[in-house]
Image: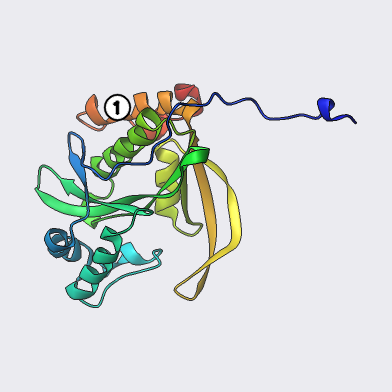
Amino acid sequence: MTQSSLQVGNLVQPIAHVDVPQRTDYKGRFITLSPINPQTDVGELYECSHGSEVKEQIWTYMSYGPFEDEHGMHKWLEEGAGSEDPLFFTVHHLESEQRVGMVSFLNIVSDMRRLELGHIWYSPDSQRSNVNTEAIYLMLCEAFDRLKYRRVEWKCDSLNEKSRSAALRLGFKFEGIFRQHMLIKGRNRDTAWYSMLDSEWSAVKKNMEIWLYQNPDRKLSLTALNSSKLCC
């Protein structure tokens, strides 16, 4: 078999400049993502994620947390504030004027135009609301619309049913399980991998905007909007 007869991938049009996510405010209608500020953020972030069994379940699948006290969380936030990858943000809920969680861009490979969304957690009161949807919407707009990245990844413990359901609801595609991928808090982690491609973003973006901004009674299902029959 000659080299000319071997199959190769499609050519990808280069772009003039490849950037990385900005350390800036990302403003939505319901939330704002702001670079973490340990001094101002720690009180509300600690309070919304500690103090009860329900709150502390947030940390079950994380490699860190829960923290012994506010000081311990402050130290961790200080480490995160200096990081470029992961690039952490605090989620500010505009209506309640409360800090309700965190997100990050990570595993940023700009020359390959891909990154991951991770380190995502919210207070129990903010789960199953427009908070996560708009946070991910803002991050995907940054990745696909401004940066012109080709791929965004979502990874989680294969046992984390909430995260796996969220990935599918938000329009990510399941790619498979990395078996015995990591050790987290002394336990095995098989990792579920999901992705979204730039070619899929236009339809997902439209569906997110319908669900977020044209669906006041929340009667529409984003999962249904992103199903193959409605999305493609």
**In terms of depth relative to the viewer, which is nearer, 122 or 32?**
32
Question: Residue 195's x, y, as percent?
Answer: 50, 40
Asked if residue 81 is positioned above or below residue 105 in the image, the reply reads below
Q: How many labels does the image show?
A: 1
Question: Residue 162's x, y, as percent?
Answer: 39, 52
Name the kind of residue labelled 1 in the image. Glu
Q: In which quarter of the image is the N terminus?
A: top right
Element at badge 1?
helix
Q: Is residue 90 left or right of residue 15?
A: left
Q: Is residue 129 left or right of residue 113?
A: left
Residue displayed at 38% across by 41% down: 20
Alpha-carbon neighbours of circle 1 within 10 Å: few (<14), some, or many (≥20)?
some
Mark yes or no: residue 152 visible: no
Q: Mark 1 points at which residue?
A: 209
**In terms of depth relative to the viewer, which is nearer, 10 or 133?**
10
**In terms of depth relative to the viewer, which is nearer, 39 or 84?**
84
Asked if residue 106 is positioned above or below residue 135 in the image, the reply reads below
The quadrant in which residue 33 appears is top left
Residue displayed at 37% across by 54% down: 86
Mark yes or no: residue 10 visible: yes
Asked if residue 133 is positioned above or below residue 53 in the image, the reply reads above
Question: Residue 110's x, y, as percent?
Answer: 46, 41
The quadrant in which residue 13 appears is top right
Q: Residue furthest front?
A: 16
Residue displayed at 19% across by 61% down: 45
The quadrant in which residue 171 appears is top left
Question: Residue 21's x, y, as percent?
Answer: 34, 41
